Image: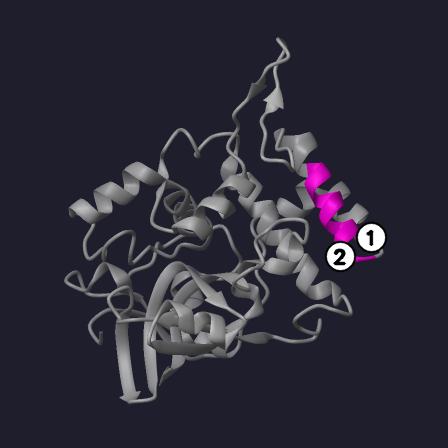
């Protein structure tokens, strides 16, 4: 990767902005995104070492009333209810997954962040997963590396299938990207709030998470310093668990990583009324991660 154009991150370290034309799609990133850190920096190992807080455009200022109400919340359950009431009022997204009533009194299906989360946890390689990966592509500038199969090139059947699914009208409507923007900002607000039973203190910058794999097919290997360490380009959105034993149910190899909290999109505690907690799942923005590799 020495032939590409280089740029420096906030700490003066060199990261690659534009890999050579024959590089795998896994090593590419969009030139633009909607956050305050360039995509080429965001997907680098250097960012993970010294992360900066991320903001998606003007999401917080445009929904200032929501975050003012959240600041008045006395506990995590109250905050969750405040968030979901706001989503119901703005997007017609009801907490019971039902659609909003039309003029005729009938409920209409509306794409919602809740349905996407439910679909992702059932199978991240279906249309719901493609919409979520497409949102990361749009907002953070990271391209997917896997969706049902490895995505190696733009001009490939794998890329075409992913593109078709991420634009699915069943899930890609009702301002779904704006809903996900708010979900991310609510997640980050919760992390910094520092509730007593939160899985991380509000001053923390990272959290240790685990992922079980049977092989490295989904992940481009950037470097392999030794048998117990690897630098992997993870999919632009991927799942981890906070519980090593649970991660072990998904593969013979356990990857453990110190994940920047700014890259956490969703975790089990921000919506405590929903059955998203069984696997202790965290949705994490990808890029280059140095991970420990161990066998069960």
Q: Is residue 37 left or right of residue 223?
A: right
Instruction: For the residues labelled 2 and 1, say whether their Cβ atoms are less than 8 Å apart.
Output: yes
Q: Looking at the picture, how far across and down is residue 225, in whole percent?
A: 29, 89
Q: Looking at the picture, how far across and down is residue 258, in whole percent?
A: 50, 77
Q: Is residue 212 left or right of residue 242?
A: left
Mark 1: few/some/many CA within 10 Å (<14, 14-19, 20+): some
Quadrant where the N terminus is found in the figure: bottom left
Looking at the image, the residue that sits furthest to the bottom is 226
Q: Is residue 265 magenta?
A: no
Q: Nearer the viewer, residue 14 or 111?
A: 111
Quadrant where the C terminus is found in the figure: bottom left
Against 73, is 53 above or below? below
Q: What is the number of the mark on residue 117? A: none
Query: To which quarter of the image does residue 131 belong?
Result: top left
How many numbered discs, if any? 2
The segment highlighted magenta reads 75-86
Mark 2, residue position? 76
Query: To which quarter of the image does residue 140 belong?
Result: bottom left
Q: Looking at the picture, how far across and down is residue 251, in whole percent?
A: 34, 71
Compute the Cα span from label 2 to label 1.
Answer: 8 Å
Whether residue 96 can be seen here: yes
Against 211, is 124 above or below? above
Circle 2 — which element?
A: helix
Mark 1, residue position? 73
Q: Is residue 160 left or right of residue 236?
A: left
Q: Is residue 84 magenta?
A: yes
Q: Nearer the viewer, residue 94 or 166?
A: 94
Magenta segment, prevailing SS (helix, strand or loop): helix
Whether residue 7 can be seen here: no
The residue depicted at 63 percent of the width and 28 percent of the height is: 92
Q: Looking at the picture, how far across and down is residue 165, in whole percent?
A: 32, 39
The residue depicted at 52 percent of the width and 25 percent of the height is: 109
């Amino acid at each position: 990767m020495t032939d590409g154009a280089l740029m420096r991150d906030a700490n003066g370290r060199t990261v690659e902005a534009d890999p050579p034309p024959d590089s795998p799609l896994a090593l590419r990133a969009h030139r633009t995104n909607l956050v305050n850190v360039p995509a080429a920096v965001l997907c680098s190992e250097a960012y993970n070492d010294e992360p900066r807080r991320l903001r998606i455009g003007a999401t917080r200022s445009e929904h200032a009333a929501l975050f003012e109400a959240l600041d008045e919340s006395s506990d995590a359950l109250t905050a969750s209810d405040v968030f979901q009431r706001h989503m119901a009022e703005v997007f017609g997204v009801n907490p019971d997954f039902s659609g909003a009533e039309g003029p005729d009194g009938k409920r209409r299906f509306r794409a919602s962040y809740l349905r996407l989360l439910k679909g992702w946890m059932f199978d991240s390689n279906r249309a719901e997963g493609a919409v979520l990966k497409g949102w990361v592509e749009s907002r953070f500038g990271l391209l997917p590396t896997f969706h049902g199969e490895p995505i190696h090139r733009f001009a490939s059947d794998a890329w075409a299938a992913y593109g078709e699914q991420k634009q699915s009208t069943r899930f890609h409507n009702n301002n779904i990207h704006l809903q996900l923007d708010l979900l991310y900002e609510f997640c980050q607000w919760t992390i910094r709030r520092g509730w007593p039973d939160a899985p991380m203190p509000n001053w923390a910058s990272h959290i240790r998470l685990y992922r079980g794999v049977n092989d490295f097919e989904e992940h481009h290997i950037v470097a392999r310093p030794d048998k117990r360490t690897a630098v992997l380009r993870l999919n632009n959105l991927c799942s981890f668990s906070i519980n090593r034993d649970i991660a072990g149910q998904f593969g013979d190899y356990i990857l453990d990583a110190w994940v920047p909290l700014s890259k956490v999109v969703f975790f089990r505690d921000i919506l405590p009324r929903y059955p998203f907690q069984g696997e202790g799942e965290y949705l994490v923005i990808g890029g280059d991660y140095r991970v420990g590799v161990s066998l069960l």
